[in-house]
Amino acid sequence: MIDAAGLRVMKAIADEGSFTGAANALGFSQPAISQMVRRLEQRTGTILIERYGRQVRLTEAGQVLARHAVAVLAALDTAEEEIAAIAGLRAGRVRLMAFPSSSATLVPQALAILKTRHPDVSVTFTGAEPPEPLAALRRGDCDLAVAFAYEGMELDVLEEDLSMLVTRRLLDDEVRLVLPGTHPLAGEQVARLSDFAAEEWIAGCPRCRGHLLTLCTHAGFAPHVAFETEDYVAVLGLVAAGLGVALVPDLILRAAKHDDVVALPLSPASRRRILAVTTADLQRVPAVAAGLDALCAAATAYGAAAPVPARGA
Amino acid sequence: MIDAAGLRVMKAIADEGSFTGAANALGFSQPAISQMVRRLEQRTGTILIERYGRQVRLTEAGQVLARHAVAVLAALDTAEEEIAAIAGLRAGRVRLMAFPSSSATLVPQALAILKTRHPDVSVTFTGAEPPEPLAALRRGDCDLAVAFAYEGMELDVLEEDLSMLVTRRLLDDEVRLVLPGTHPLAGEQVARLSDFAAEEWIAGCPRCRGHLLTLCTHAGFAPHVAFETEDYVAVLGLVAAGLGVALVPDLILRAAKHDDVVALPLSPASRRRILAVTTADLQRVPAVAAGLDALCAAATAYGAAAPVPARGA
DNA sequence: CAAACGCATAAGTGACGCTTATGCTGAGGG
DNA sequence: CCCTCAGCATAAGCGTCACTTATGCGTTTG
């Protein structure tokens, strides 16, 4: 019934004291104001303006409208400003979720970059096991997720479902074989899996374990998995203690170094692909896009840096 | 940029959880909602709604809009309600002004009627000498005025300027000659002015004095005005004390009776016309119209009542 | 796997609201 | 006292905005 335009007109008339003045102030022609007022009057069924001679005055009802106009227009302006702030990255929010082992390296770097670039964007981060980040993304509880996928897996059923989501490739994380420094093959340049068929194996997260099994199957043996833990620091500790060997992604090795272990590139090489995931719509939200960019920047920084040497520093 | 309709749509989507639900709630078709959202999004330059599969969710910006929507729409509703209250006489204001001698009789009666009929309409009354009520009306400081005009005056210059104002005739107030009860002519049925050419005269307000002079001129003499006061109680007191005679309107005699005086009808009769005055626009304001009606009702009540008897009760 | 549900898109159309042009009336000045 | 200016009202014209119906495509559900 009453719209913002009408209120704006009433306020302009109250401020300017005339239809012509209001028209100039609002960038309309004078008849436009006349018509607007008439429409308002017949919509409200009340006379809003008293025409006396060639001056106009607001009636009580007109003053009511003009008074409410300031509140309504102010609220509208506030809303617009908040929207503009979100659009201009002077505000806004990104809710990031990632698998735990990314939390040590890539994510902190990305968060730091984002904070530097856009200090007013608020970021929340939650580490969670797959497929929780993507589930949260689908539920709307998260704006941006970091996921990974082992490449070369024949069975896509093991991969997470990426339908209706958009991904951005962050970096290819080379998987290395970690063995004790005292191991006979610790001096090699590369590691062939078949040479370790008789070893005891230490497996990481469920999907990493699946990847291990797949690779070993290709190499012609079934690994004997002696230990299983999602804590990669523990994995390295176990290896250092000589309790077995493990496949560990390079990204983790950079964060969790261990002096007593050696990490050899695999031959043939195997990588896991690390992806940023969001939805098509959220991708266009400035704060999310900024978060995405920050992740990419952090990833390229890692990619540019030399991979860890085979022998622990 | 953002209008009330857009906010209403955003709020409806937030409440209903779907475009279709919002469309039903607002009485629109579903594509109308789609288009509105798209328009809002390209106007704000921000994505407001995240379409995931066949469900829709508000983005942060969308939530901002929905949140402000409740405030803005509530303010709009409040404004509409206030206007409706004014239109429905559940609120509103009448600022009444009248010449002092009306304050004792007509105006209190009218105010009582108005208060009974519309208890929620707020009335303010100010007594003021002419032409102040009409000046206030022109300035916009008053909504309704009570004025009077002596009829039969050749010179309209003495009357108040009624241009650009609308009037409503309330009642014709007969002017009587007031003389002491002990006066030789106190027993007559009517009074001929020429019989009082030698009397001392007591005059009322300036315009009443003008009227007196006009009437006496017609009667062929120039009155000797011994006293002048705007206080009609004082006039009656002076007459009762035998200090002179006076012309006093019937309306005043009803309020200010005095046992020791006699009020005779004039021959030929003379009346002053009492008018309600307002502007064409204010006439259409419900509260003003109600005030006008109340004045008319009070006036007809007075007209119906028998005029005061010649001899004081 | 089929049906249903929900949003997006396209085309059409009606009406709402702004513009220019003009008239009328009151206010101010010569 | 008349003339001119200023300001609101009205009329006619027209462009555009927004809502409608019809349809398609995708996802979800039985």
Image (cartoon, coloured by chain):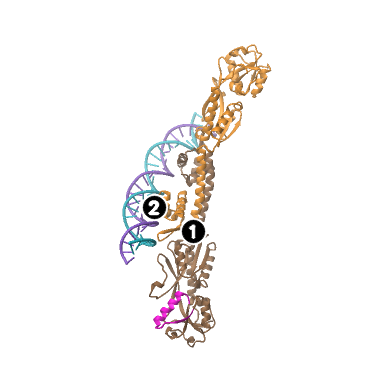
Chain colours: A orange, B brown, C cyan, D purple
Give the side of residue A308 with respect to residue C30, left or right.
Answer: right
Marking on residue A30: 2
Residue B35, given in percent of the width and then of the height, sits at 45, 40
Instruction: State the count of labels.
Output: 2
State the quadrant of the C terminus of chain B.
bottom right
Q: Is residue B218 magenta?
A: yes
Q: Chain of mark 1?
A: A
Q: Which residues are magenta?
A: B204-227
Which residue in the structure is indicated by mark 1? A60
Q: Residue at x 53, y 45 (%)?
A: B68
Q: Chain of mark 2?
A: A
- Using the numbered discs, state the Cα–Cα distance from disc 2 to disc 1 in whole angstroms: 23 Å
Q: Nearer the viewer, residue B29 or C8?
A: C8
Q: Is residue B196 in sight in this rendering?
A: yes
Category of crowding for the residue at label 1, using alpha-carbon neighbours closer than 10 angstroms: few (below 14), some (14–19), many (at least 20) = many
Q: Is residue A224 in sight in this rendering?
A: no
> What's the amino acid at mark 2?
Gln
Residue A151, given in percent of the width and then of the height, sits at 54, 21
